[in-house]
Amino acid sequence: MPTLADRTLKLVKEGRDDIMKDIIKQTKVSGNSEITCEALFSRNITKETLCYWVYDLCRLVNEEAIPLMEDAAASLNQLDELRAQNRDDQKTIITLQSEVIGKRDEEIRVMKESLKSTVKSEMKSYASAVTKSCNAITKSCSDILAPKRICSAIQTGAESAERRKNVIIYGVMEKADEDLPTLVESVLAEVGEKPLIRDCCRVGFKKPDSIRPVKFTLTSQDVVNQVLRKSSMLRVKEGYQKVYLSPDRTTEERAAHREKLLALRKKEADAEKGTKDMATLRTNELKRGHVTVNL
């Protein structure tokens, strides 16, 4: 379907062709290329005819051609702005890519430092044990155990680094045809976060009367910490009061965390009980103060 610019250009061309045909007819030349000043100054061309031609040409230029050229100029300006914006967007993308690469290099450096520290600690412990042990048996055992301990330390450090990138969601209802990535994204959206989710799955065996937690992996520990800092916002979100987030802890870490929670709840209960006892004591004292003794 032709645009407004196409229709306007067509009108300009038709108006020009009409004027040129009339000039060719009046000057009795064979084509546009033969129209000259001498032909226009011929005796059969009156001043009135020239005025009509000039008027039609001016009107055509002023009413049709100039607005069309102005629209074309505006379109070119918009095109230049879009090109400039595209260049800025490309620069932004390049900057973000550089930041991502730098972040990844930093994570690798931190992992190497963690592994190095773990291996160094294990080596010191091993060296101390070798120094305090007997000659032949200690040397024999050290030759066997040292590589295993180093491998174990490396594996422990790597698992710990990967675990720190995980987050656990508790309290999300489980469905047969659920879309876990979308489910995780909806929970994180409630706390104002939209991180890149690398992997997600349900944890544990499926039981009829229990809801399995969801474990998902993010790109770095910094992103995990940012999400966990905002997790308390779920308490005031409708439909998410029983949903909460936690880091991916080991069995030992979960047991220690559970003990801390129990101790904290006991302390809060004792404080509440003490407050109630004080209130009861105060009430009894007030009642005794209003008793009247009759002699």
Image: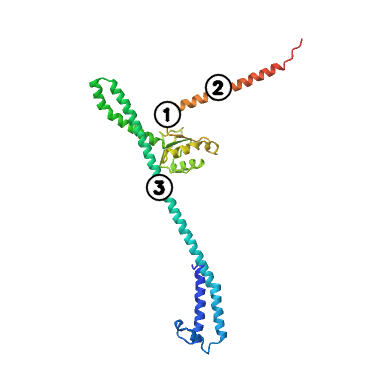
Residue at image coords 54%, 78%: 57
Identify the mark at residue 41; answer none if there is no mark. Answer: none
Q: Are marks 3 and 1 in contact (CB under 8 Å)?
A: no
Q: CA distance from mark 3 to mark 2?
A: 54 Å
- Against 113, residue 279 (above or below) is above
Q: Tell which of 49 and 250 is nearer to you.
A: 49
Q: Please name the amino acid that badge 1 sits on.
A: Glu
Question: Furthest residue to the bottom?
Answer: 43
Does the rendering let one see residue 173?
no
Task: Give the crowd class for mark 3: few <14, some 14-19, many >=20 residues within 10 Å.
Answer: few
Q: How is the image coloured?
A: rainbow
Task: Give the crowd class for mark 2: few <14, some 14-19, many >=20 residues within 10 Å.
Answer: few
Point out the image quarter for the C terminus: top right
Q: Residue 145 appears in which quarter of the rendering?
A: top left
On the image, numbered disc 3 is attached to which residue? Answer: 98
Q: CA distance from mark 1 to mark 2?
A: 26 Å
Q: Secondary structure at mark 1?
A: helix
Identify the mark at residue 253; answer none if there is no mark. Answer: 1
Rendered location of residue 187, percent (x, y): 49, 40
Question: Furthest residue to the left?
Answer: 136
On the image, numbered disc 2 is attached to which residue? Answer: 270
Q: Secondary structure at mark 3?
A: helix
Q: Secondary structure at mark 2?
A: helix
